[in-house]
Image (cartoon, helix red, strand yellow):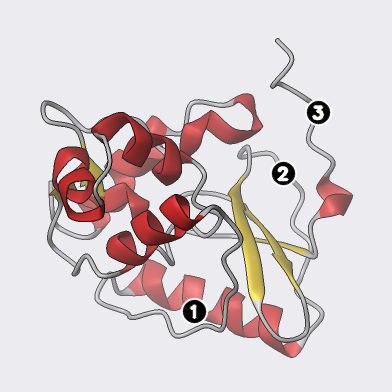
Amino acid sequence: MPWMHPIVYQDYDAIVPSLIGPLGLCATEQWLGLIDFLPPDAPLHPPQTPLLREVARQIAAYGADPAFRFDLPYRLEGTPHQRAVWERIAAIPLGEIVRYAEIAWQVGSSARAVGTACGRNPLPIVIPCHRVVAKQGLGGFNANRNGVDWGPLKYKLLVHEGVL
């Protein structure tokens, strides 16, 4: 399949542990740009910059307490539609879930387009796309990036937050 490619762990500025497994991080000195879910056997790579150390600290704090609120500088690069969806997702409070169709109505789109934007969310967990669910069932999660089904991680995050 053309979308499947080997993961190059050196492409990440850091790989840190989390309650759902290793996370690949990419950042500049000023802002966080990407969080990727990685396979369980991904080698950890400690953060080397103040920002990446703070990202790792906040991810660990969220793992210890689901009510922890992220406060990180980040930059979102995407289409105007994607950014509108991500802004709406970022506003979903802890303990709540929202349906794809509801966000679609709010941003003047379709549920499928919202699902696609959710799957392209570059900062899962920080922008809690796991809180967006289908009309029936949980729906997908993070577009199976890295060629792996991350649906079980969505379930685990919602259980961690006390939604399920």
Q: Amino acid at mark 2?
A: Ala
Q: Check the image and name the residue furthest to the right.
A: 10
Compared with 119, 53 (above or below) is below
Disc 2 and disc 1 in contact, CB within 8 angstroms = no
3 vs 2, front mark: 3
Question: Where is mark 2, residue-wise?
Answer: 42
Q: Amino acid at mark 1?
A: Gln
Examine the image and state in which quarter residue 69 appears: bottom left
Compared with 144, 119 (above or below) is below
Q: Quadrant of the N terminus?
A: top right
Left or right of 159 in this view: 119: right
Residue at 40 percent across and 63 percent down: it is: 127
Compared with 1, 146 (above or below) is below
- Residue 28 appears in the picture as rendered: yes
The percent coordinates of residue 16 (x first, y second) are 65, 63
Quote the CA–CA distance across marks 3 and 2: 12 Å
> Callout 3: 10 Å neighbours few (<14), some, many (20+)?
few
2 vs 1, front mark: 1
Residue at 14 percent across and 57 percent down: it is: 162
The percent coordinates of residue 68 (x first, y second) are 32, 79
| Disc number placed over residue 58 in the picture, else none | 1
Residue situated in front as seen by the camera: 135 or 106: 106
Residue situated in front as seen by the camera: 3 or 163: 3
Quote the CA–CA distance across marks 3 and 1: 28 Å
Left or right of 138 in this view: 36: right
Quote the CA–CA distance across marks 2 and 1: 20 Å
| Disc number placed over residue 6 in the picture, else none | 3
What SS does tag 1 mark?
helix
The percent coordinates of residue 47 (x first, y second) are 75, 74
> Callout 1: 10 Å neighbours few (<14), some, many (20+)?
some
Compared with 4, 122 (above or below) is below
Left or right of 92 in this view: 73: right
